[in-house]
């Protein structure tokens, strides 16, 4: 039987050119006048160093780059890839890689790369710095609650993200001024009480009333909290950043569909990012971070002879249900069951009540753009701003919205 002739080899001999990686197999096939399969077979059976004609050396060109290097080259995070194949040509090697990936997952991946925090701290030094003796103790702690900002919510009576950001910055400035006017607290607790972002998977209408996608919501919130840390920390002996999980902060795969445990929460993740970002800054060595224990939803801190428990508040049956919920936590000896003061958010309005034997529940206000659906249904609205108060010996004082 006659031996078959490789048309691609003949073409190389006639032209003195080499079929290489400068174009795709399909393009070579069109140029030579053969099928793509013929070019593929030619490359497969052309061993390295085989001479097809004087001056023409054929080399294996079906080598593929490392898959992870290819993805990195194109900026596609591995976790966003759903399937693989071969169809995207690498411009450097000529090899082909096919990936099916989720643009939203890539955008979220990019948002969680918190290089912008490092940039915000590079070369920064505080505009005002206070110095304290190691044994300084004013006897009280100030708590500032930056809760329920729901950044990304817009088209409300209170505006949208720009208006919310302006309110938060004003609250930070007012709080910093109060510290400088004195007296100075021994410690400040800056609280993300939950719902830092609006997210998109609570109700379908969120997609209509958002002015930022989720990745930008995350970026804006963490930069805003970094502004607060940079402003307040240099003025006090110690600043503690507290974060708790929440419903709007929950990582979800669809409406009401959790994407993990309660620990899979954007607010908690942002607190980790902030912790990493400030760790090496010499002006922020007095900043520490507190989160709930793994799989728990309540953060606890003891300060100024007072035990404080922070919980978003979404597990209660309503604003009147916190006492019953807390009593159940006490029976189960859950985190915060024996606290002097339980601090909740979620309902966007200031509320103070006693519970049990002289213990307190403080529901804090919100700086968000408001919720018109609630106002339209009930006719009620709450004063916007951050709730702050001082604690000492198990009691609170100087409670106000700023």
Image: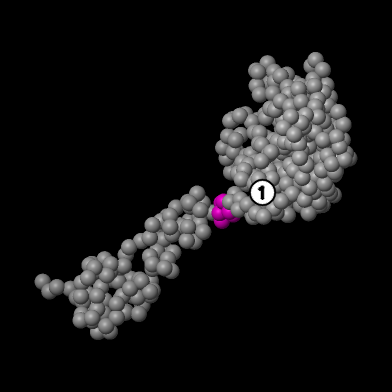
Q: Is residue 84 part of the magenta span, yes or no?
A: no
Q: Position of residue 113 (x, y in %)?
A: 58, 51
Q: Is residue 108 part of the magenta span, yes or no?
A: yes
In this picture, residue 288 sits left or right of residue 73: right
Mark 1 nearby-residue class (10 Å; few <14, some 14–19, many ≥20): many
Residue visible at 64% across and 46% down? 281
Residue visible at 86% across and 32% down? 399
* Residue where numbered disc 1 is placed: 218
In this picture, residue 401 sits left or right of residue 48: right
Q: Is 66 in front, or is 101?
A: 66
Q: Is residue 117 above or below residue 92?
A: above
Q: Is residue 179 above or below residue 67?
A: above
Q: Position of residue 99 (x, y in %)?
A: 45, 57
Residue visible at 40% across and 64% down? 96
Query: Which type of secondary structure does the marked residue at label 1 adopt?
Result: helix
Q: Position of residue 223 (x, y in %)?
A: 70, 50
Q: Is residue 46 above or below residue 239?
A: below
Residue visible at 80% across and 27% down? 139
In this picture, residue 4 sits left or right of residue 262: left
**Residues rendered magenta in the picture:** 103-110
Q: Is 230 in front, or is 42?
A: 230
Q: Is residue 322 above or below residue 128?
A: above
Viewport quadrant of the N terminus? bottom left
Q: Position of residue 153 (x, y in %)?
A: 75, 49
In this picture, residue 258 sits left or right of residue 71: right
Residue 171 in sight: no
User: In the image as oriented, which residue stretches furthest toward the bottom?
Assistant: 14
Q: Is 224 in front, or is 65?
A: 224
């Amino acid at each position: 039987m006659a031996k078959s002739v490789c048309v691609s080899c003949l073409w190389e001999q006639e032209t003195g050119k080499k079929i290489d990686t400068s174009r795709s197999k399909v393009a070579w096939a069109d140029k030579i006048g053969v099928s793509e399969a013929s070019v593929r077979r030619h490359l497969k059976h052309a061993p390295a160093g085989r001479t097809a004609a004087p001056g023409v050396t054929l080399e294996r060109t079906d080598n593929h780059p490392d898959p992870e290097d290819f993805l990195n080259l194109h900026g596609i995070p591995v976790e966003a890839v759903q399937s693989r194949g071969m169809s995207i040509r690498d411009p450097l090697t000529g090899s082909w890689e096919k990936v099916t990936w989720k643009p939203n997952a890539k955008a979220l991946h990019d948002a969680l790369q918190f290089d912008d925090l490092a940039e915000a701290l590079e070369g920064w030094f505080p505009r005002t710095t206070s110095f304290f003796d190691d044994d300084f103790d004013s006897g009280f702690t100030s708590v500032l609650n930056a809760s329920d900002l729901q950044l990304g919510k817009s088209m409300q009576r209170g505006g949208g993200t720009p208006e919310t950001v302006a309110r938060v910055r004003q609250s930070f400035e007012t709080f910093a001024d109060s510290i400088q006017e004195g007296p100075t607290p021994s410690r400040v607790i800056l609280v993300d009480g939950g719902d830092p972002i609006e997210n998109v998977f609570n109700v379908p209408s969120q997609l209509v009333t958002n002015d930022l996608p989720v990745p930008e919501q995350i970026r804006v919130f963490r930069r805003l909290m970094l502004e607060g840390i940079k402003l307040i920390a240099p003025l006090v002996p110690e600043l503690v950043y507290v974060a708790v999980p929440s419903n709007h902060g929950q990582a979800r795969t669809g409406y009401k569909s959790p994407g993990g445990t309660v620990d899979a929460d954007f607010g908690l993740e942002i607190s980790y990012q902030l912790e990493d970002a400030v760790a090496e800054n010499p002006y922020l060595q007095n900043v520490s971070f507190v989160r709930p224990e793994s799989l728990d939803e309540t953060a606890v801190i003891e300060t100024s002879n007072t035990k404080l428990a922070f919980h978003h508040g979404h597990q209660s049956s309503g604003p009147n249900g916190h006492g019953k919920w807390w009593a159940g936590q006490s029976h189960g000896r859950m985190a915060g069951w024996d606290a002097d003061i339980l601090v909740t958010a979620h309902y966007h309005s200031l509320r103070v009540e006693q519970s049990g034997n002289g213990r307190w529940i403080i529901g804090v206000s919100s700086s968000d753009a408001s919720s018109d659906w609630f106002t339209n249904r009930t006719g009620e609205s709450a004063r916007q701003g951050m709730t702050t108060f001082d604690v000492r010996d198990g009691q609170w004082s100087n409670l106000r919205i700023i």
